[in-house]
Image (tube, rainbow, N blue to C red):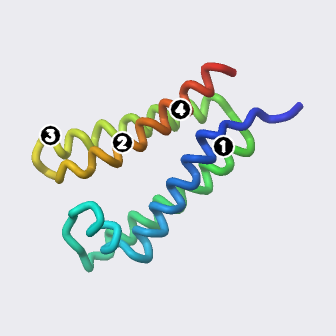
Amino acid sequence: MQTKRYPSLLGQFFYVVISGLQLLFIPNILLGIFGLEPTSEIWIRVLGLLVLALSFYYYAMYKNGGKEVIRATVQGRLFFCTGLIMFVILGMAKPVLIGFAVAEIGLALWTLSEVRKN
């Protein structure tokens, strides 16, 4: 039996790899593009490492399926997006974070539509 592959998870994999690498190796360039202050704190690179680690999970899900786990990623990703939007609403972050939320919401909804089809 062939495992159903979800192209949205491959898209998520690439999005996460690119974001993680940028945060890990060139965080201030990425921050500058989005109008955020440069930093020398280690936490931005720790975040990049964590984001990059997530890519292993997304690739495994793309290769091996597992609807229940894939649905859980959709819920987690939408929760994350809600948090980003709340940071902006509460004045804790610049509105540029909404751009990340929109991209993530789009990928999450694409994944959800694929899961529902199958």
**Residue at image location 58% in from the left, 47% down from the top:** 11
Furthest toward the front, the residue is: 33
**Label 1 sits on what residue type?**
Met
Most foreground residue, 88 or 72: 88
**Residue at image location 62% in from the left, 56% down from the top:** 56
- In this rendering, is residue 116 above or below 45? above
Q: Distance between the Cα atoms at labels 4 and 3?
A: 25 Å
Q: Distance between the Cα atoms at labels 2 and 3?
A: 14 Å
Furthest toward the bottom, the residue is: 40
Instruction: Residue under label 3, please give it.
Output: 89
* Quadrant of the rendered image containing residue 115: top right
**Residue 13 at what x, y percent from top left?**
58, 52
**Residue 77 at what x, y percent from top left?**
43, 39
Figure quadrant of the N terminus? top right
Secondary structure under tag 2 reads helix
Q: Distance between the Cα atoms at labels 1 and 4?
A: 15 Å
Secondary structure under tag 3 reads helix
Q: Which mark is residue 61?
A: 1
Q: Earlier in the sequence, mark 3 or mark 1?
A: 1
Report whether 2 appears left or right of 87.
right
Label 3–label 1 contact, CB within 8 A = no
Q: Earlier in the sequence, mark 1 or mark 4?
A: 1
Q: Which mark is residue 110?
A: 4
Query: Of discs 4 and 3, which sits in the foreground?
Result: 4
Query: Of discs 2 and 4, which sits in the foreground?
Result: 4
**Label 4 sits on what residue type?**
Trp
Q: Earlier in the sequence, mark 2 or mark 3?
A: 2
Query: Of discs 3 and 1, which sits in the foreground?
Result: 3
**Residue 100 at what x, y percent from top left?**
35, 48
Instruction: Residue under label 2, please give it.
Output: 80
Secondary structure under tag 4 reads helix
* Quadrant of the rendered image containing residue 84: top left
